[in-house]
Amino acid sequence: MTVNEEHKIVINVIKRNGKKVNFDASKIAISIQKGFDSIEGKYNETDVQNVFQSVLKRIKKDYVDKDKIKIEEIQNLIEEELKNKKYDDVYESTKNYRERRNQSRLLFVEEKKMHKFLKTLESLGLKSAHEEDAKRENANVDGDTAMGTMLQYGSTVSKEFAKSYLMKKKFADAHDSGDIHIHDLDFMPMGTTTCLQIDLNKLFKNGFSTGHGFIREPNDIMSYSALAAIAIQANQNDQHGGQAIPAFDYYLAPGVLKTYKKQLKQTMYDLLDYSGFLTFINFDKFVEKINKLNSVEFDENDFDKLCKNSDEVKRIVRISKEKALQKTDRITYQAMEAFIHNLNTMHSRAGAQVPFSSINFGTDTSAEGRMIIKNYLLALDAGLGHNETPIFPISIFKVKEGVNYNQEDKNYDLFKLACEVSAKRLFPNFSFIDSPFNLEYYKEGDYNTEVGYMGCRTRVLANVADKDKCVTAGRGNLSFTSINLPRLGIKHGIATKERKVADMEGFYKELDELLELVKDQLLERFEIQCNKRVYNFPFLIGEGLWLDSEKLKPTDKLRRVLKHGTLTVGFIGLAECLKALIGKHHGESEEAQKLGLEIIGHMKDKMDEYALKYNLNFGVIATPAEGLSGRFTRIDKAIYGNLKGITDREYYTNSFHVPVYYNISAAKKIHLEAPYHALTLAGHITYIELDGDTASNVKAFEKIVRIMKEEGIGYGAINHPVDRDPVCGYVGVIGDVCPKCGRKAGEPVSVEKLKELGCNIK
C-alpha cells in the first residue's frame, strides 16, 4: 500500500480540539520524516517508508471499522513502529519532541496562558516603544526597528506567532504540509520588506543618518566607497533580504571627479611652488578654474590665459594633469579594494551576518565612470587578503549594444575585462538590457531605466501601480511564497503508475487553487507591511530610500509607497514536475518543453490578472532559495517514496532550470531556458557549468555570454572550477601540479621559492 491508496482508508481523524477531519496519510509520512531527519545522516527514505507503510497497515486493520482515530493514537502507532523496527534513536527523538510539543501546546491552547502569551507578543510586535517598556530595555537597540524587534522575538517564536496569530490557518497548514513555502516567515510580524535597489544619489547629495549620527556629503572617492558600504549595512537592518546598488558606476563617478580636482590642485601647487612660479602667477585663479571642471578629461590649453605666456607654467599644467590622473586612478583602485573588503567583513543585524549585497555596473561611459568600472574589476580580480574570491558584493555587469557589446562601443574594453575577471573569479555575472522585457522600459541617457538585478535575483522595472515610475532604484520585492510544483506533478501525473496519461485538468485546477491561496496570503502579509509606520524603518523609509518615501511623515503608514514593490509567487522543480507528469523533463523532450512553458505561462497569466485586479505588482518569481528545494524533496520523499528522476535526489531542481546532472550543451541549455525569462520577470537566471580552466580561454567564455545575450535571457552566470593553492595562493584550475609554485598536493615548497614568486611570507 502507498500513500496514493489513502482513499481506501475512509476514516475520521479526531484532532485535539475535538474537530473531525478526513484521514490524510501524507501528514503521517511528514511526521515520520521529521523524526528521521532529527538523526542527521544515518537514515534514508527506505527507512521512512518502512515505518510509514507499517503504520498505514495497522490503521487499516485496527481502526477503519471504528470509523475514527484520535491524533494521539496515530502518534502512538508511529512510536510503536519505530520501537518495533529497532529505530531506537529515532524513537527517543520523536518521543522527546512530542513531549516538548505537548508542553508548548499548553502555552498556546490553554485559554488564560494563551491570552497572556499572545498579548506579550502583541506588545513587542504591534506596539511602538513609547507604548511598551520591553522595547526600550536595551538603549543600544531601537525597539521600534525591524531588527531590534527581531532580536527580542527570536526566529522560532516569531514563526509560531505568525502562524498562530497573524495568518489564516489554511496558510499555515499549507506551509507546514509542504504545499507551499512562505519565505522569511519569521520576519512577518515585523512587516519588513525583502530587498531594495538603493539610490545612492539620495544619500550622497546631502548626507544621511544611520540612527547613531549624521554623515556629511562625501568629497572624495574613498568616502564615496565607504559610505556605499555603510548604506548597504544600515539598510539590511531594516529588511529581511538583500541590498543592491543599481548603477554603481554612475553613483560613484562624482567621487572620482572630486578626488581628481583635489589631486590636480595639490600637484599643480607643489610643482609651481618647487619651480618658483607661485609668486609669478595668481594660483587662486587656477583653483577657481579647476573647481569648475566637469570631467577629468579637459583641454589644458584652457589654462593658457592664466599662465602669463610662460611655456614652463604651461608644461607644469600639462604634467599636473597627467600626474593627478595617475594618482586619482590609484586612489580609485584603493577605494574599490576597500569597498570589496568592507562588504566581506562588516556585519549587520546585531553582528548576525555579513550584509547580502549586489552591485550593477558597466554602462557609464564617462571617464570617471569608466575609471570606477575598471578599478572595481581589477580589485575583484585581485581577490581578498589571502587571494580568496570575494563572496560579496555579487557583481553584475550590465551588457548593452551601443555601450559595451560591440568593438566600436566605448566600454567594449571593459566588457572584455569583465569576461576575463569572471573567467577567473566566477564574478561578475551578466545582465542584458537588450532583452525585450528589459529594453521595453529603457530610455537612452537615463540610467534609472536600466534594469538592475540582485544576487537574490529580484528584478523590479514594470510598475502597474504608477506607470510613470517604471524604474529600478528605490524599489524591491515585498514578499514571496513558493509553490511545490513537483508534488502537483506527482499527484496528477504518471509517476505513481496510477494512470497512463497525466490528468492535466486536475493539475491546473489544483494549481489555480494554490495560486489563489498564495495570492490571498501575500495580500494578508501586505496588509501587515502597510500598517507599519515610517519610524519602524528609520533608514529604508526614514532616509527616503524607498521610492516616494521622502514624502511621508514619521508617523505615516506605508501603503502609498509600498505599492511600488512586488508581490511574487515562486516555484521550485519544474523539471521534476514535468518528469512526474509525462516521464521527461524539458531538457529531454520538446513535448516537455512545450508543457513547461504552458505551465509557467499559465502562472504568469494569473499573476497578470491579479496585478490588474488589485493594482499591485504581482508577478512570478523563479524562486532563488536553493535550500527550499531540499525541504520540499524531504517531505515528498516521505509521502511518495523514492520516485526515479523526481524524489531520488536530495533536492529539486532550481526553478525552471534544466537539471545540472543532465548532459546538455551550453548553447542548448541557454536556448531552452531563455523563454522562461520572459515569463518569470523576477528571479530568472541561467547558469552554465563549464569544465576546465576558463581563464585560459576567455574567447570561449565571452562566446557563451554573447549566446545568452542573443537568445534574449535577462540574467546569466557561468560557473567553472576555481581552485586555490593554500601555500602560494594561486587561484585558478589546478591539475596535478600548481601552475605557480610547481608543487603537487601535499608537497612542501621552500620559503625561498615562495619569495621568488612574490608570495607574502611573514
Image (cartoon, rainbow, N blue to C red):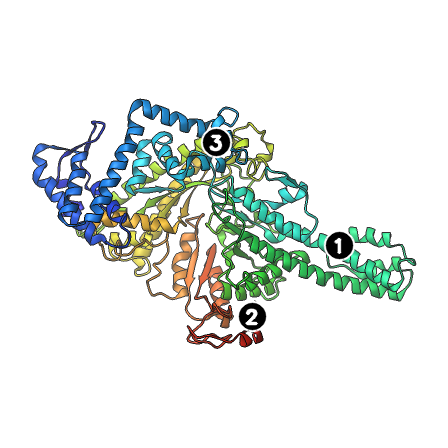
Q: Secondary structure at mark 1?
A: helix
Specify few, some or many for label 3: CA neighbours under 10 Å numbering under 14, 14-19, or 20 or more. some
Q: Which mark lies nearer to you, 2 or 3?
A: 2
Q: Are marks 1 and 2 in contact (CB under 8 Å)?
A: no
Q: Is residue 131 left or right of residue 646?
A: right
Specify which label sits upstream in the sequence, 2 or 3. Answer: 3
CA distance for labels 1 and 2: 36 Å
CA distance for labels 2 and 3: 55 Å
Label ID, residue 759: 2
Outermost residue on the top side: it is 112
Q: Position of residue 362 (x, y in %)?
A: 58, 57
Specify few, some or many for label 1: CA neighbours under 10 Å numbering under 14, 14-19, or 20 or more. many
Q: Quadrant of residue 746?
A: bottom left
Q: Secondary structure at mark 3?
A: helix
Label ID, residue 456: none
| Residue that mark 1 sits on | 261
Q: Are marks 2 and 3 in contact (CB under 8 Å)?
A: no
Q: Is residue 645 left or right of residue 248?
A: left
